[in-house]
Image: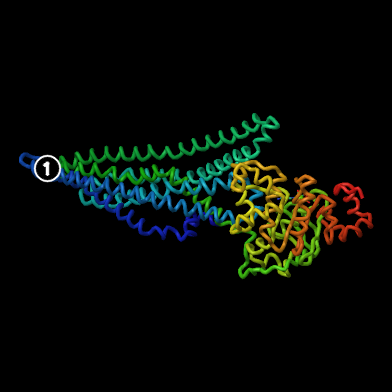
Amino acid sequence: MTRNRPLFGLASLGGLRRYRGLIALVVACVLVQTAAALAGPLVVRQIVGLVEPGAASAIGGLSLLLIAVYAVRSAAAFAVNHYSHIVAFRTCHDLRRAAYAHVQRLPPAWFADRPSGEVVSRVVKDTDEIEPLLADAVYGFVAAAVVAVGVLFVLFWLDPVLATVALLPLPAAVAFIVWQGRRVQPAFEAEATQFAEVQAEVQDNVGGMVEIQGFARERGVLAALARRSRALARRQIANRTLIARFDPAVDGATGISIALVIWAGGLRMASGAVGVEDLIAVLLYIAAVYQPLYVLVGAAESAQEGLTALRRIDALLAIRPEIADRPGAIDPRPVRGAIAFEGVGFAYGDRTPVLHDVSFAVAPGETVALVGATGAGKSTIAALLSRFHDVTGGRITLDGHDLRDLALGPLRESVARVSQDVFLFNATVREVIAMGRPDATDAEIEAAARAAEAHDFIAALPQGYATRVGKRGVRLSGGQKQRLSIARAILKDAPVLILDEATSAIDAATEARLQATLDRLMAGRTALVIAHRLSTVRRADRILVLDAGRIVEAGDHATLMARSGAYAALARTQLGAAA
Ligand SMILES: Nc1ncnc2c1ncn2[C@@H]1O[C@H](COP(=O)(O)OP(=O)(O)O)[C@@H](O)[C@H]1O
Ligand SMILES: [Mg+2]
C-alpha cells in the first residue's frame, strides 16, 4: 500500500522542511545558473552579428561579458553542488536515525525472522543511497528542466522554423526513455534485495566462522556465497546495460537535431530569413534542449537506486511494531509484583503452539520455581513476562493489569531478567553492569559485582571495571557473563525477578557461594526461578512442573516428591537429586 509513496519516509520526518532555507538558496542558485546558461548563446549571437571591420572594441566588451556570464554560471553551479550535498547528507542522517529508531521499537519476533545483515543493509546502505538522489538527481533535473523551458522560449523567439526543426527528434527520444524507464525500477528493486541477501549471508557466516572452520565447511560455504554474489553481479551488470541504452537514444536525437538544424538553417540563410548568428545560437541551444534528457539518463542510475532505497526504508518505517504501547497505556509503578498467568496459550509466529492453557499465580514476594525438560517452554514463559511476545490466548497480568495495557518501558524496568545466554555489547564491564541503572555510582557497581561473585575476576582484567568486553574486547567465559548478568540484576533492583538458568554455566562451588546472594536478591520481591539444580528448586515457595507447554504438577518440594509423579522423576534424573 505504501509502495507507491516512496516519499513516505521523508514525509515522516516532516519532509525537507527543516532545510527550507538551504533549499531556497539552492533553487536561487539554480535560477542564476539557468539565466547564465540562457544568456551565453545570446551574447555569442551578438558577437557573431558584429563580426565586421571596425567593431573590434565592441566585440572585446561583449567577449568580457561572455566570460562574466560563464563565470557567474560556474559559481552558481558550484553553489548548487555544495549546498545540495549539505541538504542531502543531513537528510541521509535524519533518515538513518529514523530508520534505526524504528528498528529499535520492533519486537524480538521480527528480528528472529530475518538475518541481521538485511536489517543493517536497510539502516546503513539504503539511507546512504538517497544522497545522490537528493543532491544530484533532483537539482540536476530541476536545473535542466528550467533551462529547457527557457531555451524553448528563446528558440521560438529566435526562429520558430528552426526551433521546430530542432525539436523534431525530441518526442521519439522521450518516448523511448519513458518506455524503457518502466523496466528500470523493478530491476533496481531486485538488485537492492539481492545486495541485502549477500550482505546478510556474509554477516551470518562471519558470526558463525568458528563453526564453519570447525566443520571444515569453508569450501561449501564459499561456493554458496559466490553463487549469490555472482547472481548479484549479473543483475548489476544487466541493470547498468538497461540504463546505458538511454545514452545512444539521447546522443542520436541530439545529433539528428543538429544535422536537421544545419540543413534547414542553410536553406533559411540562403533565403535571407535568418543570419549566421541566429543559426549559431540555435545550434548552441540544441544541447540545452536535450540536456534534461541527459540528466534524466545520467541521473537514472543514482535516481533509481535512491528511489528504490527510499521505497525500502518506507516499507521498514511502515511496519507497525506488534508490541507497542496502547493509547492510554498504564504505568504500573510502583509495582507490588503480583503475577498471574490466566489460561495462557502461545505460539511463535504461525508455528505449533508451545504453551497450552498455562495458569498460575505468584503472590508479591513469593518465589516460584519452574522446572521441566528442555524445550518444555520455561524460557518462553519468562520472555512473555517481559512482554517480548504477546500471548496468543488467555492473558498475563501484573498487579491485576493485563500486560498489554501497561506501558512497555515501565513494565520492563520493573522486571529484572537473568537469562541463559547473555549477550555482551561492545562496552566496558562498568557499562554492562549499569545497563539497568546507568546513573549508578562506581561504589554501587562494585558492591553489585561483589555480591555476584564477579568482583575478583573483574579486578583481574587488564583495566578492571574499565575493560571492554564483548566482540571487540576481552572474552569472558559463560559463567563470568552470567555473573555480570546477576550483578546487573542486583543493581537494577526491580520488583520482579526472573532467573532463567542464571547459574547454568557457573561451577558448583561458586554457585554455592552465590546462593546466599540470590536468596537475598529474591527475598522481598516476586521471583520466577527456572533452575536446573535441585538445591535451588527445593528452596522455592512453590514449584511448577512444565511438560510440553503444560503445567502438570504444582506444589512444594516435599509434597511433589511424596507424589512420586513427574517432579519426582525429574528430580531423580535432571535435577540431579540423590534423595
Ligand atoms: N524464538 C523462537 N522461535 C520459534 N520457536 C522457539 C523460539 N524460542 C523457543 N522456541 C521453541 O519453543 C519451545 C519452548 O522453548 P523454550 O521456552 O526455550 O524451552 P525451555 O526454556 O523450557 O528449554 C521449543 O520447542 C523451542 O524450539
Ligand atoms: Mg530455556
With 213 as the anchor, is 297 left or right in this view? left
Q: Residue at x 71, y 64 (%)?
A: 495
Q: Which residue is at a point 32% across and 56% down the rendered structure image?
A: 25
- Viewer-proximal residue, 15 or 53? 15
Q: Which residue is mark 1?
A: 60
- Horizontally, is 553 left or right of 173 in the view? right
Colour logic: rainbow
Q: Amino acid at mark 1?
A: Gly
Q: Is residue 119 left or right of residue 148?
A: right
Q: Nearer the viewer, residue 223 or 546?
A: 546
Q: Is ligand 1 less than 8 Å from the beta carbon at label 1?
A: no
Q: Residues within 10 Å of mark 1 (few under 14, many from 20)?
A: few
User: Foreground residue, 438 or 204?
Assistant: 438
> Where residue 270 sits: x, y (%)?
15, 40
SS at mark 1? helix
Q: Residue 560, located in which quarter of the rendered image?
A: bottom right
